[in-house]
Amino acid sequence: MGRYLNLTTKGFRESIQSEIYVDKTGMISHLNRMIDTEQKYVCVSRPRRFGKSMAVKMLSAYYNAEADSSDMFRGMEIAKDSTYEKYRNKYEVVLANMQEFYGGYADVDLMIRRINDVICREIQKRYPDVEYTDEGSLVETMYDVFLATDRTFIILIDEWDCIFRESGCGEDGWRKYLNFLRDWMKDKPYISLAYMTGILPVKKYGNHSALNMFVEYSMTNPRRMGCYMGFTGDEVEKLCMRYQVCFEDVKAWYDGYSFEGLPSIYSPKSVVECLTSHVFDNYWNQTETFEALKVYIQMNYNGLKDSVVEMIAGNRVRINTGSFTNDMKTFHSADDVLTLLVHLGYLAYDFERKEVYIPNKEVRNEFLNAVNAIGWDEITAAVRNSERLRKRICRSGLSAKGEVSG
């Protein structure tokens, strides 16, 4: 096993050995049906702390040809599927966390060169008897292994979009990176499945993309992947019974994301922290404070402030997500900013109604912290007045109830 090729299954084993583990292996059955088809390129994007990296570790453990992961998947949902044995531990798996590469170099050319070199080296070490056309080319190396052995690869990319979320790269760097991914993967017979995950969907340039072969599942349109984007309401209700925590309280604090056929989706991070500690608090966004939210909601786009005020008041706002270019720098309207906040998890999106809203108490608290830091005093005052009014109504209702019962 290598660092990037067929790496150890330890990461997924740690996940299933954790105090709270929710079985999401059903996603594998969907991916198995995409292997060696025109739909074999899959991009699943979702916010931080929603289980992206755990999913990649799970897929690596399942497909890894140098492992026997049968004990880890025994009794899980995928083990009941007809494709389970056919694909388990049958592929050469390349797993690359792009944040690791880009964070170490912060230069796209160096990043690409490093990815090319280290993966080439590991593949050539695993297949020393193959005659390589160009030992310095990742594409040629994988082609040569495929032609000589008929073995194919599964490519897993975590944090695929990191360079679109970091400053200093620029459009030229973006294009180099996208072209590298396209040249590495598009129309290549040595690939049986390519799975990318990150916060943002595939970057768009105008009406086309260098990675237009990818089928996308995102927070604005997750389709069949919706139940794997986070914890479902049924899953959380069972956990609440196990940990003897009031489900309605957990729902008030952390519910609010919803997809077609799935009225309740929760951030796994928030639920796990709350249930194991029995303390309700803001957990999901601890790694990214309200300062990040503040940057976006105070941008000077027509209607943006009004929309934020509406949502803090508990209302929904209709938006058009179509013009968003899938990076964190290019904005043309308030709708683009609000669409980014959906992908970041600060807003939930109703696909049918094309509306956004603040999903729950946890996230609403972050909006209140942000507007308070910005200095939108009139909003802060209005929220306080609204809370006072709500409490007075509750108290008067209780008093009236007491008088009637008396």
Image: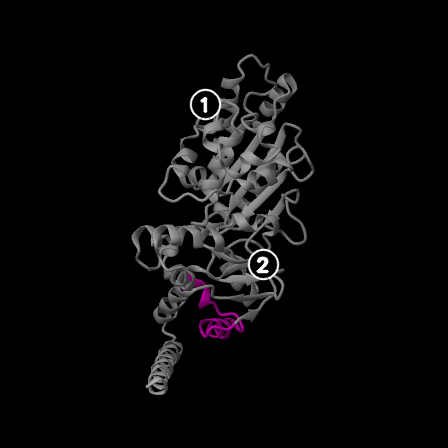
Q: In terms of depth relative to the viewer, which is nearer, 208 or 259? A: 259
The quadrant where residue 313 appears: bottom left
Say how many tags the image has.
2
Please report the bounds of the magenta region as a residue range: 293-315
Q: Which mark is residue 1?
A: 1
User: Which circle marks residue 264 in the picture?
Assistant: none
| Magenta stretch: helix, strand or loop mostly | helix
- Which scheme is used to colour this image of the protein? one colour
Residue 180 visible to the viewer = no
* Residue type highlighted by circle 1: Met
- Is the residue marked by circle 2 packed among few (<14), some (14-19), or many (20+) residues within 10 Å? many
Cα separation, mark 2 vs mark 1, equals: 40 Å
**Is residue 127 placed above or below 220 in the rendered structure?**
above
Q: Secondary structure at mark 2?
A: loop
248 up-or-down from 158: above or below? below
Quickly name the residue at label 2.
324
* Quarter of the figure that contains the C terminus: bottom left
Report the side of 142 relative to 364 (left or right): right
How far across and down, in percent of the image, does residue 218 sit? 56, 52
- In front: mark 2 or mark 1? 1
Q: Earlier in the sequence, mark 2 or mark 1?
A: 1
Across and down, in percent, residue 380 comes to 37, 76
Q: Is residue 123 magenta?
A: no
Provide the secondary structure element on which disc 1 rests. loop
Q: Amino acid at mark 2?
A: Phe
Image location of residue 257, percent across then percent down:
50, 59
Query: On screen, 252 above or below 14?
Result: below
